[in-house]
Amino acid sequence: MSKYHALTEAQAVQYARSLPDLFTPDSELSSHEIGDGNLNLVFHISEPSTGKSIILKQAIPYAKVVGESMPLTLDRARIESEALLIQESLCPDLVPHVYAYEPDLALTVMQDLSDHTIMRKGLIEGNRYPLFAQHIGRFIAHTLFYTSDLGMNQQEKKLRVKQFINPELCKITEDLIFDDPYRDADTNNIPPAIRDAVEVLWKDQELLLEVAILRNGFLTKAQSLLHGDLHTGSIFIKEDSTKVIDPEFAYYGPMGFDIGALFANLLLNFTAQEGWSKDAKSRADYRNYLLGTVKDVWSFFVGEFRSLWALYGVDRVFAGESYQDYYLQQVLRDTWGYTGAKMVRRVHGLAQVADINKLEDPAAKERAQRIALRIGTTLIKQHRQATSIDGLIEIALNNVE
Amino acid sequence: MSKYHALTEAQAVQYARSLPDLFTPDSELSSHEIGDGNLNLVFHISEPSTGKSIILKQAIPYAKVVGESMPLTLDRARIESEALLIQESLCPDLVPHVYAYEPDLALTVMQDLSDHTIMRKGLIEGNRYPLFAQHIGRFIAHTLFYTSDLGMNQQEKKLRVKQFINPELCKITEDLIFDDPYRDADTNNIPPAIRDAVEVLWKDQELLLEVAILRNGFLTKAQSLLHGDLHTGSIFIKEDSTKVIDPEFAYYGPMGFDIGALFANLLLNFTAQEGWSKDAKSRADYRNYLLGTVKDVWSFFVGEFRSLWALYGVDRVFAGESYQDYYLQQVLRDTWGYTGAKMVRRVHGLAQVADINKLEDPAAKERAQRIALRIGTTLIKQHRQATSIDGLIEIALNNVE
């Protein structure tokens, strides 16, 4: 680690020049640091003469969390680049290409996706992405299946578990998703208007039991190599392309945690239509689009997952149809639960979402927050009885009608 | 690994002499290799002039499994000695003391337990061990609690998971316990007299579903650092002392797997009383003793585990009483299931037990085998509905009456 130093823009250019087969020798390159500076430096390096460009992402050895700097391992750059390479091997079109990884500098060189939009922003703008459900359904089916005991050599899988032991970033999730929102923690950002609803959670014993069960699953269920932070801010999108980025939270955990992260963020945008939609009809339309996306993602996931299992399952004992039904039912239950947990933490936890927080009308914002808490807590409480994705959609609809 | 070489008896003496503070300088030491030679060399080194003695256990780089040699990692010696050291830190009186560990030689120097008997042998001889339930109940409570997310720092636990990734030895369990007994595998040793009952298992879809669920738990549920092979042949015992040995299968898995291994082997001896007991009364007596032991172990375990949790639980979210009840019910369910799986594999799998196999009367042996299959398969099938340890005991009794 002694060779580590944070790059300047000039050093980023110099490093980019040293990469083989990317830029024309001696051509002019421009460099801009475009990261938000919380966790990483992000340099956009472009060659005006050819239009070529790349991204250099460099981890910095601290994070601005809880308002101040705290040390954070540079090993997350290794985790991110190694996870990206595995994901690229499984779904080459759905992640940025990695050109190089420089361990000493905690630096990953990857494809520039400036022509894509961050999906959260796209949804806030009311855009629709007709290919998204199919793309992301394939992404979760392939990454979750092929890294699990169902789809890869089970002894190599154990070495993967070892490779992706990720204590520091898991700790962030454990605190911010599965602990702090359920007590009066300093890290929370409780909107004063809904403090009454938040305080109800802290005393709801039925809810707290189910949160403990979900926390335990996050801590112990080493099913698949997860992305670990699969919200709509980790997805670059345009009409015909979907790219999943930023897998620095990758570790072996429950499949439903990734799927739930995705559904939670679609449903948070669903609640935020209290403010974004111009009228009742456009609100109902866009909500239907979002719920349709949830349903389609699940259908594509299940269809693809089942066919991968039938064709490429590695385990004789797991090949029975009734076991596969049982297994997918467990994934569904986890998905309900983690969807709920991921919604609740975004309402009054440390890290919230622009979908709700950028609403200008305080009444609409408050309605969205209360709806999100109701949907989230209902999903958490009912997750062990879940039987279908339609049930989840019904809970969402019941809480806005 | 280049420094590795299998020790001769003379080299074992030489090595023992080099250990500080053990033997008198220049005194005569005797050395005998007493291992069965399947997996390890075991040297008993003693100093006749003082009566002092130690054990040198050296892993050999292959195993005699399936009738021929297969390569097997020497890393298991590291796993064994590191697991022993953790167990010793938690229950110093219940494991052999480790004097030294020599990684290059895959060699562990430990306390000589020649004054103890292997418990399987003791049970076959009809002995009773009044302190055993209390001892082993404490062993499982402390080792399972303090290595789990309930009782240790959760980020350090993840590093422990990494430390005890144990692919090769887990593979043996995965094959011999959770696969081969449920198909016509070459590795099985099917007693011809009960082939009919064995073939029934292979077509029992209800059973195969539950076996798949238990297999999945073994593969993915990283709850605690398990001993991994906690049968009565891994326990040295005498009236006032219990010592758990041989944790080379240690890895992070479901708590119920260790408890189930123990119960299965008590119940196998229970079935074998078809032959060992002289008459109906002594048979009923000894069976009551064994079932009483199962019940007492569970009670001591639960009592101790709950009090450790109350006093030393590290996790606020897991502190609720209803969660603790839920958690222990899940451990009970796993215990039923793994007890059943561990019984079935010992009837017609590769590795069987002397309790049954040493019975001389073929009719008694066959009865014992059929009883073991009935108890085992019933426990597997009903494990997800388990509510009490009494239910397990009832199943055992119902199948001999």
Image (spheres, coloured by chain):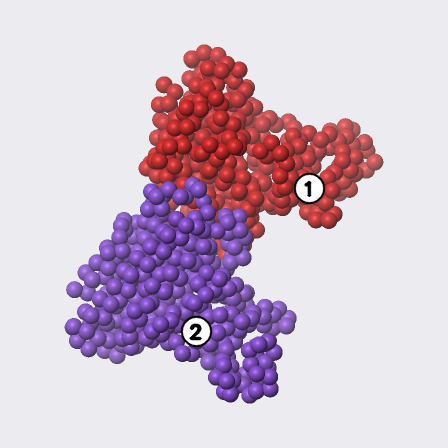
Chain colours: A purple, B red
Q: B37 or B102, which lies in front?
A: B37
Q: Is residue B81 left or right of residue B196?
A: right
Q: Amino acid at mark 1?
A: Leu
Q: Is residue A171 shown to the viewer in this render? A: no
Give the image quarter of residue A239: bottom left
Q: Which chain does the numbered disc 2 sit on?
A: A
User: What whole-number distance in Å separates the C-alpha atoms at marks 1 and 2?
Assistant: 51 Å
Q: Amino acid at mark 2?
A: Gly
Where is residue B391 drawn, in percent x and y?
35, 30
Return the residue found at the far right. B26
* Residue located at (19% from left, 73% from top): A282
Q: Which mark is residue A289?
A: none
* Residue located at (53% from left, 48% from top): A155
Q: Which chain does the numbered disc 1 sit on?
A: B
Q: Residues within 10 Å of mark 2 (few under 14, many from 20)?
A: few
Label 2 sits on a secondary structure element that is loop
Q: Is residue A341 left or right of residue A88?
A: left
Where is residue B232 drawn, in percent x and y?
53, 30
Q: Is residue B261 left or right of residue A370?
A: right
Q: Residues within 10 Å of mark 1 (few under 14, many from 20)?
A: many
Label 1 sits on a secondary structure element that is strand
Q: Which residue is mark 1?
A: B107
Q: Which mark is residue A67?
A: 2
